Image (cartoon, rainbow, N blue to C red):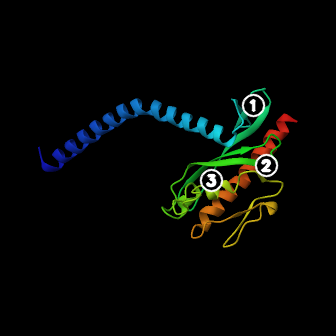
Amino acid sequence: MNKSLRLIVVLTTVSLVSGFVLAILNKYTAPRIELNQNKALSEAVGFVIPDKKTCDVRVIEGLSFYIGKDAKGQLAGIAFVAEGDGFQSRLKIIVGMDARFEKIVKIKVLQQAETPGLGTKIDNDPTNKTNPQWFSEQFCDLAVGKEITYVKNQTADKSKTQIQAITGATISSKAVVDIINQAIKTHRAVYLNKVN
């Protein structure tokens, strides 16, 4: 057997064995990954709708709504996942809204891989010892009659629907604002149109 043919046989065998091993590992780990993702999503819904005791999932026009109800069965809030591009990664944020889509209750970043030490502050800012979640907490109880805007190097005015951008991570801050604005607009239109 010549050298080229031997190399092809060895590479083909290694590729087949590697593919087989990866397929088996995927079959074993995929259900666990999905279970962990569903658990994290369920916990996040509980975080952004703190008064919920039960949660129903409703899909309307391809959009998923997590409808939280309190102990009396009354609507406690509605959550949905907002996704979009950040500075260098895909951002996935769960947004909890009041029943009329007039106010954000809370948000939580589910997925991000922004620049370490800068863009990652959209989720957790270790440099802020008193409140590492200061960025996402700006969205708590934020009225959204108009679009959210951001300001740099100054204090945000909640009455004007403003949040303060992260110094050195303006693009990530703007991405969060844009993603949430777009998701609220889309989800509000679909949900209120179907409910009313």
- Dot 2 amino acid type: Lys
Cβ–Cβ under 8 Å for marks 2 and 1: no
- Dot 3 amino acid type: Gly
- Which mark is in front, 2 or 1? 1
Q: Residue 65, percent across and down? A: 71, 37
Quick one: label 2 or label 3, which is nearer the N terminus? Answer: 3
What residue is pinned by disc 3?
Answer: 84
Looking at the image, the residue that sits furthest to the front is 130
Cβ–Cβ under 8 Å for marks 2 and 3: no
Q: Nearer the viewer, residue 52 or 37?
A: 52
Q: Nearer the viewer, residue 10 or 65?
A: 65
**Which quadrant, please, contains the N terminus?**
top left
**Helix or strand or loop: what does disc 2 sit on?**
strand
Residue in the picture at 72% in, 53% down: 182
What residue is pinned by disc 1?
Answer: 70
Quick one: label 2 or label 1, which is nearer the N terminus? Answer: 1
Looking at the image, the residue that sits furthest to the top is 72
- Number of labelled discs? 3
Residue in the picture at 70% in, 53% down: 180
Give above or below for 162 relative to 38: below
- Dot 1 amino acid type: Asp
**Residue 42 vs residue 5: left or right?**
right
Q: Residue 54, percent across and down? A: 69, 28
Q: Residue 103, labelled with which disc?
A: 2
**Which quadrant, please, contains the C terminus?**
top right
Looking at the image, the residue that sits furthest to the left is 1
Residue in the picture at 77% in, 50% down: 185
Compute the Cα span from label 2 to label 1. Answer: 18 Å
